[in-house]
Structures are given as C-alpha cells and as structure tokens.
Amino acid sequence: MSAWNIERRRGDRGLLGGLLVGLVAGTASAVVIFILQERGVINLPGQGMSFVAASAAFVVDIVLSLGLSVIIVVIILNIVFH
C-alpha cells in the first residue's frame, strides 16, 4: 500500500470526524435554544421556536462540518506534499 493510499484513508476518517462534530454541535445548539425557551429567555409564538432551533442546528452543523473538513484536508495535503 502506497503512502498516498494511507494518507487518503486518514483523510476520509478526518472528513467523517468533521461531519460528526458538526452533527453533535448542531444538535447541542438546538438543545440550547430549547432550554432558553423553557426558561423564558426567548419567547416566540406557535412554531417559531421550533423553526429557530432547527435553523440554528442547520447553520452550526454546516459551518462546523465544512470548516473542520477544510482544515483537515489542508493538514493532510501539507503532510502528503511536504
């Protein structure tokens, strides 16, 4: 197995790690919004809080998933090409 294949496999795990971190952080942000609603800090009528919680989870997930994936790819490329 060549060094490139070994590094590529490490990169795949890194990308999955970035996605997992994004998923966990997105879920945590929705839970924080829920707790803020239950304590009366944020008060929106009807489905407003559900929409805000889902939006926060989506945005946090996307930002962290993409950000960590890019960082991991840059690190791996530095390892492979230096």
Image (spheres, grey):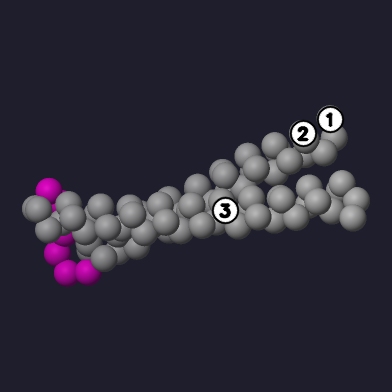
* Residue furthest to the bottom: 46
Report the disc number at residue 53.
none
Q: Quadrant of residue 35?
A: bottom left
Residue visible at 17% across and 69% down?
46
Mark 3 element type: helix
What is the three-letter code of the residue carrying label 3?
A: Gly
Q: Residue 71, percent across and down?
A: 63, 39
The image shows residue 49 at horizontal and vertical percentages of 22, 62
Whole-angstrom CA distance, mark 1 to mark 2, is: 6 Å
Q: Magenta stretch: residue 76 in it?
A: no
Question: Gap in Å between the C-alphas at discs 3 and 2?
Answer: 19 Å
Neighbour class for label 2 at 10 Å: few (<14), some, many (≥20)?
few
Per the rendering, the mark at residue 82 is 1
Read off the magenta span.
41-47
* Labels 3 and 2: the sequence-earlier one: 3
Say if residue 6 shows up in the picture. yes
Residue position for label 3:
17
Q: Nearer the viewer, residue 65 or 59?
A: 65
Q: Which residue is mark 2?
A: 78
Closest to the observer: 40 or 21?
21
Instruction: Residue at 60% x, 57% y: name it.
Output: 16
Q: Amino acid at mark 1?
A: His
For residue 28, above or below residue 51? above
What kind of element bears circle 1? loop
Mark 1 neighbour density, 10 Å: few (under 14) some (14–19) many (20 or more): few
Say if mark 1 contacts mark 2, CB within 8 Å: yes
Is 7 situated left or right of 14 in this image? right
